Image: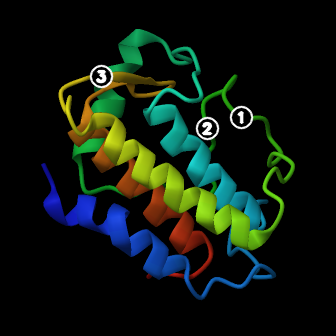
């Protein structure tokens, strides 16, 4: 397991978004800053089964997705979620404020870690990567969070 990536998810995400301005413009994609925070929180919720999507890719694609998961490759700019998972447009805002969205994201990260604390081998379903255990979710969440931090120039 990547302790460094887990530590980043636990503390680095909050530190990275601390200075994010709610009016910040994305370098790519259609999301505004609050939509990005809510989107990240949503996918932490997928990992601990608060939100459930069915597998949305053919099973024969899973090996190449898993290869990507274990690689050092980043998500490309404008990477789209598999069809049937998210629409073409960002979801409407659901949190009452930007500050609430930031807090909700941290709560979702904390819930993810707590969910797997006693059962790290437990597997939950990601709609494109299939069933993932805690370590695999850490890898995926790290890639996903870094992708969106790059989107708003919060990391290079």
The front one of 10 and 53 is 10
Q: Earlier in the sequence, mark 2 or mark 1?
A: 2
- The x and y percentages for residue 48 are 44, 32
Q: Earlier in the sequence, mark 2 or mark 3?
A: 2
Q: Which residue is mark 2?
A: 81
Question: Label 1, on which residue?
Answer: 86
Circle 3 sits on which residue?
Answer: 123
Residue at screen point 31% across, 68% down: 8
Question: For the C terminus, which image quadrant?
Answer: bottom left
Of labels 1 and 3, earlier in sequence is 1
Give how far across and how far down residue 37 sits, in percent: 64, 61
Q: CA distance from mark 2 to mark 1?
A: 6 Å
Between the residue at mark 2 and the residue at mark 3, the CA separation in whole angstroms equals 21 Å
12 or 103, nearer to the observer? 103
Q: Judge from the rendering whether residue 3 lies leftward or rightward of residue 151; answer left or right.
A: left
Q: Secondary structure at mark 3?
A: loop
Q: Residue at x 51, y 15 (%)?
A: 55
Q: Is residue 91 left or right of residue 130?
A: right
């Amino acid at each position: 397991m990547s302790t460094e990536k887990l530590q980043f998810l636990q503390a680095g995400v909050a530190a990275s978004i601390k200075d994010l301005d709610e009016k910040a413009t994305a370098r790519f994609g259609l999301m505004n800053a609050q939509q990005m925070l809510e989107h990240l929180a949503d996918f932490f919720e997928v990992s601990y089964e608060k939100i459930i999507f069915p597998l949305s890719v053919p099973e024969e694609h899973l090996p190449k997705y898993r290869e990507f998961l274990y690689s050092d490759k980043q998500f490309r700019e404008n990477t789209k979620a598999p069809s049937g998972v998210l629409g073409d447009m960002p979801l409407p805002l659901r949190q009452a404020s930007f500050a609430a969205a930031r807090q909700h994201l941290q709560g979702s990260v904390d819930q993810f870690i707590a969910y797997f604390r006693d059962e790290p081998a437990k597997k939950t379903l990601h709609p494109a990567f299939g069933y993932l255990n805690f370590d695999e979710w850490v890898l995926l969440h790290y890639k996903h969070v870094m992708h969106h931090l790059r989107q708003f120039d919060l990391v290079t």
